[in-house]
Image: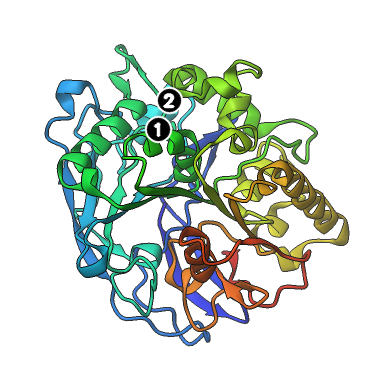
Amino acid sequence: MKLLWVLGFMGMVLCRRTDGYADVNGTKEEDLHYTESNVYGYGPNGYGVFSRPLMVGLTLINGAAAKGAVCLDGTLPGYHIHRGYGSGANSWLIQLEGGGWCDTIRNCVYRKKTRRGSSAYMEKQIPFAGILSNKAGENPDFYNWNRVKVRYCDGASFGGDSQNEAAQLYFRGQRIWEAAMADLMSKGMRYANQALLSGCSAGGVATVLHCDEFRAMFHGTTRVKCLSDAGLFLDVIDVSGRRTLRNMFRRVVSLQGAYKSLPWSCTNRLNPTLCFFPQHLIASVKTPLFLVNAAYDTWQIQASLASPTADPNGLWHECTKNHAHCAAWQMNFFQGFRNQMLKAVSGFSRASKNGLFINSCFAHCQTERQDTWFSQNSPHIGNKGIAKSVGNWYFDRVNIKAIDCPYPCDKSCHNLVFR
């Protein structure tokens, strides 16, 4: 989805939602994928003014079709790559794009006519900002690495392996993942001395699902780690007493055959639907993993906790668009959600190899936006922002387990507010 930047002030980001295609329980939801991909400056809001980002062209994976690795509509998958140089020439950062899921034939047919289901609709160039920026002043630890954004066009977090011939739908997320990695390995990634797999939202789920597969591609001497941003989707009860997200994930896993790609370490003890939730996977991931998540994730608030289906009378409508409009009892509900998130990471956080940055903000996808990734006034916990925390963890400079105090104590948030 695109966010159109309107204005930012007093720690809030005003935006409006466009390009709706995710569907939750039959109700069309706007795709809440908060990539500021069309933002070149952040206005007079104290976040700083950034230079125009590097525009990077789309590369289609020409050998993918022979492997059955195609988008929903059968077109070739692709990625955007900007080559590293100097000390980063043999370092690789792979970012898996996010953008919701499709869980019914109808939704997937709709999706295949968008950039999330067909390379025919993808932008030919996209800006590289945040963790993909090529400027040391905007991305201090990874600016000169080989940086790749793998486009998302399957609708199951790069995890499906099926098809529906009647609807001419190809659910080939797992094959797209494998084809993209094979292509990048042939283009020099096999020589990497450092590699980081990252992703936001649905791409953050994919990062958790594929983290150990990614590690297995490299020699034992290569430093390999994974970063999941806004990927900690929780299996929680919504405002109606039901489980909106569990029901949607169940349909995704079943329709797209994603159960075939789920880690056996989870499916040998839990239902495949539950194994699509990262909370049931993170503790068993062997590769070092870092989680960046807003404690009050706006996608989960709007599409899982208080979706229009769960809130047919609109009691939560204004609250989900702007947390300042929430009543005390609604904020208490969100505090309960935060508590469940902290419980979900408790075992994971005990492993010294893993890292955490959970800030008490109303946000989603903070590594892709320049203002939240690294800027003069980017969100921080203590004296560390997101970029420095991730860098310190990746290079083993400092052990990072940063958990914010509850809302409203954090005044550094760039909270999202919807029109």
Task: Select label 1 or label 2 by which is in front.
Answer: 1
Above or below, 174 against 116 in this view is above
Q: Residue furthest top?
A: 166
Above or below, 157 against 290 in this view is above
Where is residue 145 shown, x and y percent of the image?
28, 62
Q: Residue furthest right?
A: 329
Q: Tell me the element at label 2.
A: helix
Above or below, 389 against 251 in this view is below
Viewer-side residue, 360 vs 82 = 82
Choose top left, top right, bottom left or bottom right for residue 329. Answer: bottom right
Residue 213 — which label?
Answer: 1
Q: CA distance from mark 1 to mark 2?
A: 32 Å
Where is residue 225 shown, x and y percent of the image?
45, 48
Please give the name of the residue rendered at 21% of the width and 69% of the height, measured from the top-left corner.
Answer: 86
Q: Tell me the element at label 1.
A: helix
Tell me which amino acid carries mark 1.
Glu
Choose top left, top right, bottom left or bottom right for residue 69. Answer: top left
- 1 or 2: tag closer to the N-terminus: 2
Residues packed near mark 1 inside 10 Å, few (<14), some (14 to 19) or many (20 plus): some
Where is residue 52 shown, x and y percent of the image?
28, 77
Q: Is residue 91 left or right of residue 347?
A: left
Q: Is residue 217 left or right of residue 295?
A: left
Viewer-side residue, 381 vs 20 = 381
Please give the name of the residue rendered at 22% of the width and 27% of the height, measured from the top-left corner.
Answer: 74
Please give the residue where the numbered disc 2 appears in the rendered image: 106
Above or below, 366 against 338 in this view is below
